[in-house]
Each structure stands twice: as structure tokens, then as C-alpha cells.
């Protein structure tokens, strides 16, 4: 049993508590989902369970926490780590070793487990999470999603009582995420493992959830079974949004629970050409027969793509398929074969300064871009690098698009990961590039912030800016994309209309497509319109 009673916490130098008077209980062997908008205190609360808050964060804390008879406030993370496994939003932050196998074995080695038993335990978890192919690789050589799996394996291998996961599926492809959650569910059932997960992408997690704790800035928390909590909040996954619009009760949590009904006008969408092959739509980026080999491994092979002005191209596919390598190739950051033509010029003939004057790039980890002391200074640094200037009023107006005005003087690395993601996107786009490359831009973003991201991506597209978007968030990709490319095993297996990608390829079907098969509906808006 885990109990929280009247818990209040306030960070040093902050004028307001992150949360106050939290009171709830978590039963052993249950899975609790912590939700809420970015900056609502989800990650802070998770860190209270193992003593990182307040022992490493500092700050003022009051109230009581009991984790299986241990008090994290009094005993701290050294004691709690024996019972609590923790996976951060940014798995890179917790790695000790530089190889996958050594990292997974670290917890067991630190506990003094004999080598034979340790080797058996590590092999077992590697097999369960299906990461045998990266077992002997260096962590720096694997994708962001694969790093997330390694961090989860490290937390699971030690046989903890409580497993805490902060956005565990944010960088995982849909199939890998489902397999991971199924494995966690099995451990919950067979070993009595208690699980607390913080997440924004609720559609993946609801089928496994026993209770939801919803945190909101300036409002009382809501705690209870999923249907009870979801009925009281507005920002919900597609299955709940559709059920509410169709006045279905009780709310279905799983696709299988959705009643076999049709809206009054059940129109089937045809798949119309979006004229992307029309010669009047000028190509801004052409990729011809691109191949990349790294450490004797073929990462990309025979990639051909043609991106046009104002197009939003979404690239999806499993972890380790080569998606990030493709973006880095466009920037000229990796050794490659083949041609990349940018505005009529071969990338090889341009220096890096010429490339980045035309292309903005958001990497998976926003921390890679954040160096200034304030959010406003991040924008000013980008402008200075491009020989541009904007007034304070213009900077504030720009930040308002990202709901960051109240953070303009904040130190970027002190913000939540969702807020840092927004700062990084603002910093790379302030100079109005011709092409924007985004690697997992919805990572750590709540539903309302993703809606805002949709709005300004569409606005940039209307201005003729091309956007290449890598994502595992198929619901967002279905809303935003003009065209979809599926990349698997370093090769393109499909490029075409979103209605084909998100209905006919089972691993990437949206919830709407699964609820209404055969109609080519892929978003909740399709349901509303029909």
C-alpha cells in the first residue's frame, strides 16, 4: 500500500507550490496513471515516491508519504532505491555505462548478485523486451526509443516492489509500446508489481490502468477509476472524445468495448489526390538513392523522397528504422551515399552555415539546443546567429504562440520537458526557415499544447514552409500530415496518403480507424463531419 496524505511541495525560489494537499491511496499490484497538462507537477510528484524530491531538488515539503512502510521524505533515495525502480522522461540522464548489457546489469551488480545469476536475469529481461539485437551495442549507437527500452529494462531487472515510469512510451512505436505494456501488465499480475506512470498519450495506457490521478494548475486533483476521471476532464484521447460526442455511456476504455454503432450519416471517405506530383508545386528538397552505413551496419538503403514547398510530410516506423539518421543526413551531419538537393543545390556543395540558414532542426532531446540563461535569450541567440534582430515586443508576441510568455525569464533547463520542447521549437523557428525538421516534437506535450503545435505547423505550411515530422504519435500525424512515409529496416515501405497509412497498415491504425473500419476515417473530426 502507498499512501499520500496532505502532501504539499514548493520548489526553492518559487512563489507557488507545485501541488498542495494531495491525498490518495494506491493499492499494491495496481497501475495508476498520472495525467495533467505540462508543468502541472506530474514529474515532481513521481520524484516524491523515491525521495529525489526533496533530497535532490531542495524546496519545502509537508504532509506524509508511505511507500510500503518507508518514508521517502525521511529516508531518501538511497534507501528507497532498494524497493523503487524509476525511469526518467529522458533516459539518457540515468545511464551509468556506455554499453546496453552493462547498463541493464548495473543494478544487479551493485547488489552483489553472482555473475551466473546476473547473466541469466539480464538475458531474461532482454528477451522479454525483445531487444536482443542491441544487446551488445553502445548506448550512443541506438535510437531514442531503444534507449527508453534499455532504461526500462534496467528498472525491471532488479525485482522492485514499485515501478515508476515517466512518459515510458513517448519514444516507442505503437507495436513496441503495446508489447512493453503487456509485459508490465503480466509482471503486475504475476508478481504483484505496483506501477505509477505519468503520461500525456493516454490512448496507449488506458486499457492497462486501474486508477487515474489528474493534476491541474490551480484546481483540485481528481482521483479515481478511469471512466470516472475521464468524464470530468476535457482533454482526452480519441476513443473518449468520440464516445462523449456520441453520448455513449459508460465510456469505453478499450476499442473492444466500443459499441457497434454508426453515426447517422456514415459516409465513407474517398482517397483524393493532394496534387503533390503537380509540377506547379515546386520541390524544395529532393533525396535520391540515399544510403548510410555506420559501423558496418546499413542504417538507410535506397531512400528516394521529394518534398515540396508547404508540404507536411510525416515519417513513421519502428524504433531503430533509421528515421533520425535520415534527418541528420539532410543536414549533412552523417557520411552517406546518394544525392540530397536543397533548393536546386547539392548539399555536398554547401557549407553548414548555408544549410542551416534554410533548414531548422529539432532533435529528439530538446536539451541539446538549450544553453542560454533565459527563454528570451534562447531566441536572441538564434537571431544573432542568423544576423537578425527583433524587438522585445516581437519576441513576446512570438512566445505567446507557444504559451511561453510567463516563462520568458525562466532558466530553460528548469522547465518541464514539455515546456523545454516548446522553447526548443520556438528557438529553431524564430528566424523563419524554409524547411523545418522535427524529431518527435510531441514528446512530453499535453493535448492542448499539441493542438497549438498543430495550429502553427499548419500556419507555416500555408506560408510555403515545408515540414518533415518524425513521430510515433499516429493520432497527431493523422491530423497534421499531407503525406506519410513508413520507414522500416532502413527502407521506405510506403509513401502516400494519410488515409491509406493509418487505415491499411495495422500497426499504425488510429483509434478512429479501428472503431470505424472500412470508412477511411482516421481522426475524430472525420466522425464529427459525418
Image (spheres, helix red, strand yellow):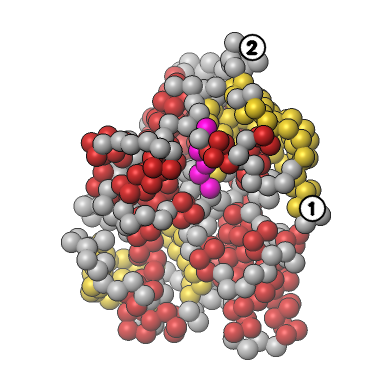
Where residue 425 sits, quadrant-wise, is top left
The prevailing secondary structure element of the residues shown in magenta is strand
CA distance for labels 2 and 1? 37 Å
Whether residue 432 is visible here, answered yes or no, is yes
**Residue 342 relative to residue 360: left or right:** right
Q: Residue at x 53, y 62 (%)?
A: 91
* Neighbourhood count class around disc 2 (C-alpha, 10 Å): few under 14, some 14–19, many 20 upward: few
Reply yes or no: does residue 458 show up in magenta.
no
Helix, strand or loop under label 1 = strand
Nearer the N terminus, badge 2 or badge 1?
Answer: 2
* Neighbourhood count class around disc 1 (C-alpha, 10 Å): few under 14, some 14–19, many 20 upward: few
What is the magenta range? 358-363
- Please say if 256 is above or below 466: below
Q: Which residue is mark 1?
A: 297
Measured from the top left, where is residue 82 in percent x and y? 50, 82
Q: Residue at x 75, y 84 (%)?
A: 116
Mark number for residue 279? 2
Q: Residue at x 64, y 83 (%)?
A: 109
Where residue 525 sits, quadrant-wise, is top left
Amino acid at each position: 500500500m502507498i499512501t499520500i496524505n496532505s502532501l504539499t511541495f514548493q520548489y526553492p525560489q518559487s512563489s507557488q507550490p507545485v501541488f498542495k494537499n494531495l491525498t490518495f491511496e494506491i493499492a499494491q499490484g495496481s497501475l495508476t496513471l498520472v495525467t495533467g497538462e505540462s508543468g502541472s507537477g506530474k514529474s515532481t510528484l513521481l520524484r516524491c515516491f523515491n525521495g529525489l524530491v526533496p533530497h535532490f531538488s531542495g524546496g519545502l515539503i509537508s504532509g506524509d508519504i508511505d511507500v510500503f512502510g518507508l518514508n521517502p521524505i525521511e529516508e531518501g533515495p538511497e534507501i528507497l532505491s532498494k524497493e523503487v525502480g524509476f525511469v526518467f522522461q529522458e533516459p539518457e540522464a540515468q545511464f551509468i555505462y556506455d554499453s546496453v548489457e552493462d547498463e541493464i546489469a548495473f543494478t544487479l551488480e551493485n547488489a552483489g548478485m553472482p555473475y551466473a545469476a546476473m547473466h541469466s536475469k539480464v538475458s531474461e529481461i532482454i528477451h522479454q523486451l525483445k531487444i536482443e539485437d542491441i544487446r551488445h551495442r553502445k548506448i550512443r549507437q541506438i535510437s531514442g526509443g531503444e534507449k527508453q527500452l534499455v532504461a526500462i529494462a534496467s528498472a525491471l531487472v532488479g525485482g522492485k516492489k514499485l515501478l515508476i515510469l515517466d512518459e515510458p512510451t513517448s519514444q516507442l512505436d505503437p507495436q513496441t509500446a503495446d508489447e512493453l505494456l503487456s509485459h508490465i501488465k503480466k509482471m503486475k499480475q504475476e508478481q504483484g508489481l505496483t506501477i505509477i506512470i505519468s503520461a500525456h498519450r493516454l490512448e496507449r495506457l488506458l486499457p492497462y490502468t486501474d486508477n487515474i490521478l489528474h493534476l491541474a494548475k490551480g484546481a483540485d486533483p481528481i482521483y479515481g477509476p478511469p471512466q470516472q476521471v475521464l468524464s470530468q476532464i476535457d482533454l482526452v484521447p480519441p476513443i473518449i472524445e468520440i464516445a462523449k460526442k456520441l453520448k455513449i455511456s459508460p465510456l469505453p476504455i478499450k476499442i473492444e468495448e466500443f459499441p457497434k454503432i454508426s453515426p447517422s450519416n456514415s459516409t465513407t471517405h474517398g482517397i483524393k489526390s493532394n496534387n503533390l506530383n503537380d509540377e506547379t508545386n515546386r520541390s524544395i528538397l529532393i533525396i535520391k538513392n540515399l544510403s548510410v552505413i555506420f559501423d558496418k551496419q546499413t542504417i538507410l538503403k535506397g531512400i528516394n523522397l521529394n518534398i515540396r514547398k508547404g508540404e507536411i510530410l510525416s515519417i513513421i516506423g519502428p524504433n531503430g528504422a533509421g528515421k533520425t539518421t535520415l534527418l541528420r543526413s539532410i543536414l549533412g551531419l552523417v557520411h552517406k551515399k546518394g544525392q540530397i538537393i536543397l533548393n536546386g543545390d547539392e548539399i555536398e556543395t554547401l557549407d553548414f552555415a548555408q544549410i542551416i540558414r534554410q533548414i531548422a532542426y529539432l532533435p529528439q532531446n530538446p536539451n541539446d539546443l538549450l544553453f542560454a540563461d533565459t527563454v528570451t535569450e534562447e531566441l536572441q541567440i538564434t537571431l544573432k546567429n542568423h544576423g537578425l534582430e527583433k524587438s522585445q515586443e516581437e519576441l513576446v508576441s512570438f512566445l505567446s504562440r507557444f504559451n511561453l510568455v510567463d516563462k520568458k525569464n525562466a532558466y530553460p533547463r528548469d522547465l518541464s520537458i514539455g515546456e523545454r520542447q516548446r522553447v526548443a521549437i520556438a528557438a529553431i523557428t524564430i528566424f523563419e526557415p524554409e524547411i523545418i525538421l522535427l524529431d518527435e516534437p510531441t514528446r512530453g506535450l499535453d493535448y492542448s499544447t499539441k493542438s497549438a503545435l498543430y495550429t502553427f505547423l499548419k500556419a507555416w505550411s500555408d506560408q510555403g514552409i515545408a515540414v518533415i515530422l518524425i513521430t510515433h504519435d499516429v493520432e497527431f500525424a493523422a491530423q497534421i500530415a499531407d503525406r506519410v512515409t513508413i520507414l522500416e529496416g532502413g527502407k521506405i515501405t510506403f509513401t502516400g496518403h494519410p488515409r491509406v497509412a493509418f487505415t491499411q497498415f495495422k500497426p499504425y491504425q488510429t483509434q478512429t480507424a479501428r472503431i470505424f473500419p472500412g470508412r477511411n476515417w482516421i481522426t475524430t473530426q472525420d466522425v464529427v463531419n459525418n
